[in-house]
Amino acid sequence: MNSFANQVSFLVITAFFEPLMPTIDRIKALLKIPATAKWRLDRAPLDLTRPGFSQPKRGGALPISVSVWSPASRPELTAFCAHSEDGWGHFVGKISAANGPESISVRSTATDEPWGLQEVSYRKPGSYWPARIVQWLQEEDGYKFLDEGEPFGFENDLNPDPRKRIATRADVLRFVNRFGIDLDNKNFWKSDVEAIYLQEVRDNISPSK
């Protein structure tokens, strides 16, 4: 299937194992919304053409924007797309540390992208740090492989060689599919309810749309 997950040059997504509104309540509590004026929250139909979906921005110089939705294919989950190359992993960790739900995060570049990256990380409730992370990262002196945490029982079925389990985006999609998260399903990138859009508001900086 030619889903959105296979159309973008840099795929950045986290799936939380709980429905949309409980996750939104957690996010609002951690960001102190509406008590703080630093965040704007909007509700609108899911729009994959918004800036950041196809090419997440680099660094933290620009305000953070996040799209959160209930996938039509898995409404018991919540999709969280921070429009930055790190997927706002710091905040995902804070949600987990605050007794948030289990989560799976993916960062994956297309094969023709410079500075290639393939990464899957899994977090348990109550812990900021991933309980499992597998990563291929291209650096100036070549690719570096990171393999931390207890492997899942299905990983040998994917490939006996740990270095080949997430060597490509197709491998990454197969990996997370073992958790019932089919990013290659077009309906994962659709929603039967309005999505939630969060926008950081900084003084003297116009928020991105």
Image (spheres, helix red, strand yellow):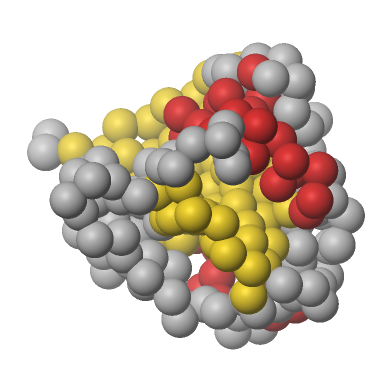
Q: With respect to residue 145, does 50 lie above or below?
A: below
Q: Position of residue 20 (x, y in %)?
A: 78, 53
Answer left or right for 68 relative to 53. right
Answer left or right for 202 relative to 177. left
Q: Residue furthest left?
A: 140
Answer left or right for 20 relative to 113. right
Q: With respect to residue 71, does 83 lie above or below?
A: above
Quadrant location of residue 138? top left
Quadrant location of residue 137? top left
Q: With respect to residue 117, does 163 lie above or below?
A: above
Q: Nearer the viewer, residue 138 or 186?
A: 186
Q: Position of residue 152 (x, y in %)?
A: 74, 29
Q: Residue furthest right?
A: 76
Q: Nearer the viewer, residue 191 or 207?
A: 207
Quadrant housing the N terminus: bottom right
Total residue callouts: 0
What residue do we see at 38% from left, 65% from top?
A: 52
What residue do we see at 41% from left, 42% from top?
A: 38
What residue do we see at 20% from left, 54% from top?
A: 205
Q: Nearer the viewer, residue 26 or 173?
A: 26
Answer left or right for 36 relative to 121. left
Quadrant location of residue 190? bottom right
What residue do we see at 45% from left, 81% from top?
A: 49
Residue 173 in view of the camera: no
Q: Position of residue 82 (x, y in %)?
A: 47, 52
Residue 99 in view of the camera: yes
Quadrant housing the C terminus: bottom left
